[in-house]
Amino acid sequence: MDALTLPGGGRGELVLRRPPEPAGGARRSDRTDRTDRTDRIGGGDRADDAGLRDGVGTVQAVALTTAPGPPPPGLSAAKIVAYLHGPEPYLLIPDPGPGLHRTLLRWLEGRPAVVGPVVARADAGASLRWARTLLALAPQWPGTAGELLFVDDHLAKVVLFQDPLLAGHLSARWLGRLRDMTPRQRERMEQTLLAWLEGGGATKAALLLRIHPQTVRYRLRRLEQLFGSSLRTTQARFEILLALKIHGMAAECARLRRRAEELPPRQSPAHS
C-alpha cells in the first residue's frame, strides 16, 4: 500500500447550492448555483489556503471514493471546499456542526467515505491524510450500500498504518522469526504470544486461549528460543505487540477484501 498524500496539482472548488436569499426576500436565479475555482492544494499536508473562507476556525475532511451529486439543503448555507474531478475526491467542511453526519449520509447516497477528525483550519490536510489512510484500509463492498467511517473510531489502526511501509517493516522484523513454521504452527504461536503480552503471564494467557497453562508454557519456551532475551525487555515486548496488531489488522483487511470481491456488483436502479 503506497503512502497517501494530498493530490499534487489538484484544484479545489467551492460548492454553494441554493445560497441564502438576499435581503428583501427576492429569489435568485438557478444560475446562482455555481462552482468557483480556489487555490491549489498539494505538496504536503497543509490546506489553510484551500479556499476556506475567512473566519473559519475548524474544518473536517471527508475522503471519498467517487464524487457525490449536488449537496443537500442541510449543507446549502455553508461553502464546502470540494475536489471532485480527480482520482482521490474529497470534501473540506468548515466549522462542522450537529447533524452533519446524517446530512453527509444523504449526500453520499451509499458511496463509501471516511470522515477525518475536526481540526484547526491550518491542519485540514492532516485530517484528510488520516481519512485517506483509513479509506485505503477499508474494504469496498460492491454488493452493498457504502459505509461512512470515522477516523476517531479507528485511531489506533490509522496510527499503525499511517506509514504502511514502516508498519510492514516492523511486523516483518519481529514476526519473521516464525517464518519456518507451518501456517498452523505460526498461527498458534502468534495467538499465544499476543495472549501472553496482553494477559501479563502464562496463566492469564491460558485463560484467554482456553487451553491448559502447561501448553502455554511449552509454547513460550519455544518462543524464547526464537526471540531470545528480547521477550524480557519492555521496548521489545511493546514492538512485538505492535507487530502482532499490525499483522492481525492487515490479515483482517485482506479477508474482508476477498469477501467483498466475491459479492456480486450492485445493480443500478432501472430508470423508466
Image: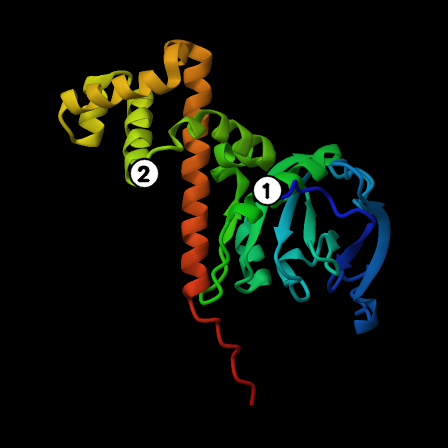
Q: Label 2 sits on what residue type?
A: Thr
- How far is mark 1 from mark 2, CA to CA? 32 Å
Residue linked to disc 2: 182
Please report the residue visible at 80 percent of the width from the left and 39 percent of the height from the top.
43
Please report the residue visible at 69 percent of the width from the left and 54 percent of the height from the top.
88
Please report the residue visible at 57 percent of the width from the left and 53 percent of the height from the top.
113
> Do we see residue 121 in this rendering?
yes
Front-lying residue, 102 or 253: 253
Residue 192 sits in quarter: top left
Residue 26 sits in quarter: bottom right
First along the sequence among labels 1 and 2: 1
**Label number found at residue 133:** 1
Q: Position of residue 53 (x, y in %)?
A: 81, 44
Q: In the drawing, does residue 57 fall left or right of residue 185?
A: right
Q: Position of residue 52 (x, y in %)?
A: 79, 44
Q: Position of residue 142 (x, y in %)?
A: 49, 65
Q: In the drawing, does residue 65 fall left or right of residue 226?
A: right
Q: Quadrant of the C terminus?
A: bottom right
Q: Label 1 sits on what residue type?
A: Thr
Front-lying residue, 201 or 7: 201
Please report the residue visible at 41 percent of the width from the left and 13 percent of the height from the top.
230
**Label number found at residue 154:** none
Q: Quadrant of the N terminus?
A: top right
Q: Mark 1 and mark 2 in contact? Answer it, CB < 8 Å.
A: no
